[in-house]
Image (cartoon, rainbow, N blue to C red):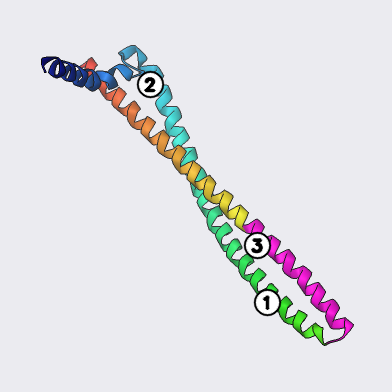
C-alpha cells in the first residue's frame, strides 16, 4: 500500500512538471528564437485566416452552383421524359428532338455530378484549413506560455 502511495505521488509530480521540461525555449538566451517563431506562427495564422475566408466564400459559390446544377438536371430529365413519351406515337422529327433532349439531360446530370464533386472538395479544403488554423493557434498559446515562463525567470 505504501509503495502505491509513493509511486502515485511521484508519478503525479513528474506529470505536473512534464510541461516545463517539454518547453523548447527555456532561457533568456532563447528569447530571440522564440520571438522569431512567434512572428512566423502569427504570420501563418494571418495567412491561414485569409485562405479560410476565401475557401468559405468559394464553398458558398460551389453550394449555389451544385444546387442550380441539380435542379437543372432534374428539370431536363423530366422534360426529356415528356418528349420521349410524346415521340412514341409521333413522327421521326419528334423522336430526334427527344433524343437530343435526352443527350442534354445526360450532360446536365454530369454537370451536376461535377458540381457535387467540387462542393465536396471545397468542404474538405475548409475542414483542413480550419484544422491547420486551430493547430497554429494552439502553438501560439504554447509560445505565449513559454514567453511567460521566461519572463517569470527573469524577474
Q: Quadrant of the N terminus?
A: top left
Q: Which residue is mark 2?
A: 34
Comparing 122 with 120, the one in front is 120
Residue 8 in sight in this render:
yes
The residue mark sitting in front, 2 or 1, is 1
- Check whether the beta carbons of the residues at disc 3 and disc 2 lie within 8 A of each other: no
Distance between the alpha carbons at the discs numbered 2 and 1: 64 Å
Comparing 34 with 4, the one in front is 4
Residue 50 in sight in this render:
no
Magenta region, main secondary structure:
helix
Q: Measuring 43% from the left and 22% from the top, which residue is drawn there?
A: 36
Which residue is farthest front?
1
Q: Position of residue 32 (x, y in %)?
A: 39, 17
Q: Measuring 62% from the left and 66% from the top, which residue is drawn there?
A: 70
Q: Which residue is mark 3?
A: 112
Q: Earlier in the sequence, mark 2 or mark 1?
A: 2
Q: Does residue 108 sit above or below 134 in this rendering?
A: below
Q: Does residue 103 sit above or below 22 in this rendering?
A: below
Magenta stretch?
A: 90-115
Which residue is farthest left?
2
Instruction: Give left or right: position of 11 versus 30.
Output: left
The residue mark sitting in front, 3 or 2, is 3
Q: Position of residue 50 (x, y in %)?
A: 49, 44
Amino acid at each position: 500500500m505504501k509503495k502505491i502511495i509513493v509511486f502515485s505521488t511521484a508519478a503525479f509530480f513528474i506529470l505536473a512538471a512534464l510541461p516545463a521540461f517539454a518547453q523548447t525555449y527555456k532561457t533568456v538566451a532563447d528569447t530571440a528564437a522564440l520571438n522569431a517563431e512567434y512572428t512566423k506562427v502569427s504570420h501563418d495564422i494571418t495567412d491561414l485566416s485569409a485562405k479560410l475566408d476565401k475557401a468559405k466564400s468559394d464553398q458558398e459559390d460551389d453550394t449555389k452552383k451544385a444546387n442550380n446544377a441539380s435542379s437543372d438536371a432534374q428539370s431536363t430529365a423530366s422534360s426529356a421524359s415528356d418528349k420521349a413519351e410524346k415521340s412514341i406515337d409521333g413522327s421521326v422529327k419528334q423522336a430526334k428532338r427527344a433524343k437530343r433532349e435526352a443527350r442534354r439531360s445526360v450532360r446536365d446530370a454530369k454537370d451536376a455530378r461535377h458540381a457535387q464533386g467540387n462542393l465536396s472538395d471545397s468542404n474538405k479544403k475548409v475542414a483542413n484549413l480550419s484544422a491547420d488554423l486551430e493547430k497554429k493557434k494552439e502553438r501560439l498559446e504554447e509560445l505565449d506560455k513559454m514567453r511567460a515562463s521566461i519572463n517569470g525567470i527573469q524577474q
